[in-house]
Image: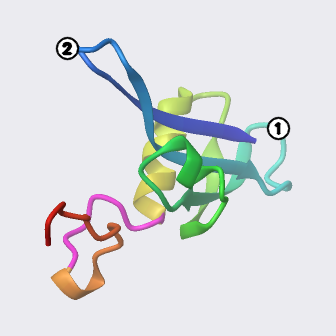
Amino acid sequence: MIVVRVELHSAITGQVSEIARAEICNMGGGGLHLGDYSIRTLRGRSAAELDRRQYQRFGEVRRHQRLRLHVWHLVAKALAAAGYGKPLAESDSDMLPLEVPGT
């Protein structure tokens, strides 16, 4: 399994926070040169929320040229397969609601 973590490194405080995570799994098949993969993204904006392992989006990448292409190509294809990079209608947003203090 490939785990992709997105970390925010604060230039002001030096604090490092995990803000997103995805898991890319080899589904088997495809042979030596081609691979089939599934992707799952986890819901949350912090390591504690992401550690709950609530899956948010899913997708599949078929016949990826795993020996010819760098892993970043797989990551890009997997995120696209899960619907990232496409415009969402406001009602389709998968972002968690922001909690505004005092409201």
Q: Residue at x 57, y 47 (%)?
A: 48
Q: Mark 2 = which residue? A: 12
Res 24 label: none
Note whether 50 is above or below 3 in the view shown: below
Circle 1 is placed at which residue position?
Answer: 32
Relative horizontal placement of residue 51, taking residue 70 as reference (left or right)? right
Q: What's under tag 2, amino acid-wise?
A: Ile
Q: Does the stretch in magenta take in 28? A: no
Q: Residues within 10 Å of mark 1 (few under 14, many from 20)?
A: few
Of residues 66 and 41, the one nearer the viewer is 41
Please tell me whether mark 1 sits on a helix, a strand or a loop. Answer: loop
Q: Earlier in the sequence, mark 1 or mark 2?
A: 2
Q: Residue at point 53% right, 26% down?
A: 70
Q: List x then y, in percent, for residue 46.
A: 47, 45
Q: Quadrant of residue 33?
A: top right
Asked which secondary structure carries label 2, the reply is loop
Residue 16 picture location, percent across and down: 41, 22
**Colouring chosen for the image of the structure:** rainbow
Q: Which residues are magenta?
A: 82-88
Q: Assign the C terminus to one quadrant of the image.
A: bottom left
Q: Quadrant of residue 8?
A: top left
Crowding at mark 2 (Cα within 10 Å: few <14, some 14-19, many 20+): few
Q: Is residue 86 shown in magenta?
A: yes
Please name the predominant secondary structure of the magenta segment in the image. Answer: loop
Taking depth in this image into account, of 6 and 58 the one nearest to the observer is 6
Q: Quadrant of the N terminus?
A: top right
Q: Which residue appears at 85% of the width and 56% of the height? A: 29
* Residue closer to the observer: 85 or 94: 94
